[in-house]
Image (cartoon, rainbow, N blue to C red):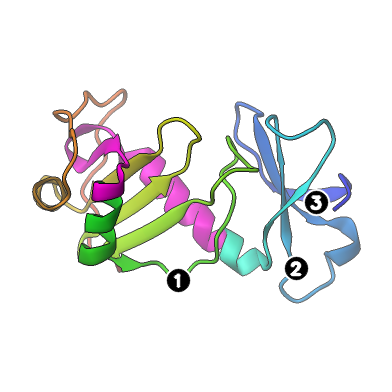
Amino acid sequence: MSRAAASGRSPRQGCADWGIPLDRVDDDDPPVGLFSDYLPQGVWQPFLGRVSLACVEMVLSETLMARRYGPYGRECLATAEAVAAVEAACAAVALPPCPAWYDPQGEPTRWFSAPGKLLCLEPSPTEPTLVVIGQSPGDVLEIVATVPGEWPADEPVPYEEPAPFEDVPF
């Protein structure tokens, strides 16, 4: 994939960029590529095969980032025991494997859901992380009680706490 792409998502930190190859912008649902500070200079990597899937991943990722601290989210080390418990208790989100911007050549990010809950297995070569967010603090505590791990107390929110979600489909 060439670096010539129409950018569709770029965090303000400038550490990654997602875009559609210019020679595919006229496609009905074109593929999306990833450019990351963690890839060789000027190299794009395939991210997801369709822009519609990349939009779903973006909504999941940004929702997770917005709620992962405070009473609506927690995280712990994704041990094999924790992953097995998540796989047994939650449904895998039907999203093809996609690379993490911070480790694009590593294991893919994996998503799971249960009523009122969204979980993400964030890959890392050293310390993969399990992140859970919920519609309520009780939803988060249900996962903490179900999934073994060293779950810290809820972390202070580094910003004003968002209002609870209503009628979210996960």
Q: How many marks?
A: 3
- Say whether residue 69 is magenta: yes
| Picture residue at 66% right of the left edge, 36% below the top | 16
Q: Residue at x 22, y 51 (%)?
A: 134
Give the vertical position of 98 relative to 92 (above or below): above
- How crowded pointer 1 is (Cα within 10 Å; few <14, some 14-19, many 20+) is rated as few
121 is within the stretch colored magenta: no
Residue sitting at x 37%, y 50%:
120
- Name which residue lies at 39% across and 48% down: 121
Q: Which residue in the structure is indicated by mark 3?
A: 6
Mark 2 or mark 3, which is nearer to you? 2
| Most common secondary structure along the magenta stretch | helix
Q: Amino acid at mark 1?
A: Ala
- Residue 133 placed where, x, y %? 26, 47
Mark 3 residue type: Ala
Above or below, 156 against 150 in this view is above
Among the two numbered marks 2 and 3 on one chain, the one whose residue lies closer to the N terminus = 3
The disc, 2 or 1, on the residue closer to the chain's N-terminal end is 2
The residue range painted magenta reads: 55-81
Question: In the image, is 1 to the left or to the right of 128?
Answer: right
- Report whether residue 21 is seen: yes
* Residue carrying label 1: 94
Q: Are marks 2 and 3 in contact (CB under 8 Å)?
A: no
Q: Secondary structure at mark 3?
A: strand
Estimate how packed mark 2 is, as few (under 14), some (14 to 19) or many (20 or more) residues with alpha carbons within 10 Å: some
Does 90 sit left or right of 60 as displayed? left
- Mark 2 sits on what residue? 30
Q: Residue 6: percent from the left, percent from the top? A: 80, 51
